[in-house]
Amino acid sequence: FLRFSDICASGQAAGKRVFIRADLNVPQDDDGNITEDTRIRASLPAIQMALDAGAAVMVTSHLGRPTEGEFKPEDSLAPVAKRLGELLGREVPLVSNWVDGGFEVAPGQLVLLENCRLNVGEKKNKPELAAKLGQLCDIFVHDAFGTAHRAEGTTYGIAETAPVACAGPLLAAEMDALTQALLEPKRPLVAIVGGSKVSTKLSILKTLASKVDQLIVGGGIANTFLLA
């Protein structure tokens, strides 16, 4: 797979519009304060890599499960923009209603694009949205491993319509680890899978079952097996 680090190393990101899909879905308290910023910190290498390469950088993420087309203050990435700015030591402007463009990003600049799940057609990966997303950038960087299993506009659709699509450092590291574990594993190989939504993990469980020596399920999905 194509790595963003290789694109940057070869100078191909200089002056280009780079769209990074990050996972900045962080927990907040009732007042909207971020209570844990690990995901924001994990997104920094891809963002810094793009800035250092001289790209015009756009970053977006989902936050929670908002209703498409209906903005509510609690769905905003404003607290994330503030924290990102603190960590990078620079102002990070937040751009709303960005799908049709109408905003400027110069090489060396960074903007955060408002909660992508507010965009109509994001969840169902509507072709019209995917086409618009692809026109916003020269290079699409997928760096959101936590949502990589979802075929949505900013995780899948844009990868098909952008001129170049590649894996960011976070996604690449996870893919390398998974490839190593599944292609050349040390035996016995045990997989532990948890979480609350069994519906989103059935295909993964099915695939893993044929590759591992033991499959252990925990969390909410274990209840489904206990009741079966």
Image (cartoon, grey):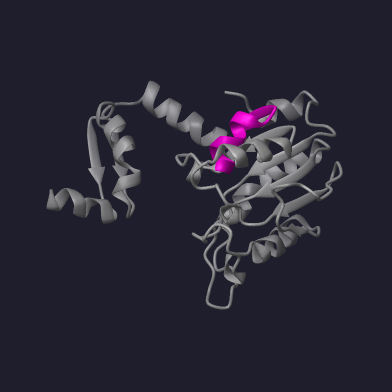
Considering only vertical position in the picture, is 141 above or below 195? above
What is the number of callouts on the image? Answer: 0
Q: Position of residue 126 (x, y in %)?
A: 54, 41
- The magenta segment is 153-166
Question: To which quarter of the image does residue 72 belong?
Answer: bottom right
Front residue of 168 and 129: 129
* Residue 73 is covered by the magenta coloring: no
Q: Quadrant of the N terminus?
A: top right
The answer to whether residue 184 is seen in the rendering is no
Considering only vertical position in the picture, is 129 above or below 81? above
Residue lying furthest bottom? 31
Considering only vertical position in the picture, is 172 above or below 71? above
The answer to whether residue 214 is seen in the rendering is yes
Front residue of 125 and 185: 125
Task: Using residue 58 as the reference point, say whether residue 191 is left or right of it.
Answer: left
Task: Using residue 107 as the reference point, say whether residue 71 is left or right of it.
Answer: left
For the point 30% across and 30% down, which residue is it? 207
Dominant secondary structure (helix, strand or loop) of the stretch shown in magenta = helix
For the point 61% across and 56% down, which residue is it? 115
Q: Position of residue 79 (x, y in %)?
A: 65, 66
* Residue 161 is covered by the magenta coloring: yes
Question: To which quarter of the image does residue 172 belong?
Answer: top right
For the point 45% across and 39% down, which residue is it? 149
Q: Position of residue 5 (x, y in %)?
A: 68, 30
Residue lying furthest front? 128
Considering only vertical position in the picture, is 46 above or below 218? above
Q: Position of residue 30 (x, y in %)?
A: 53, 77
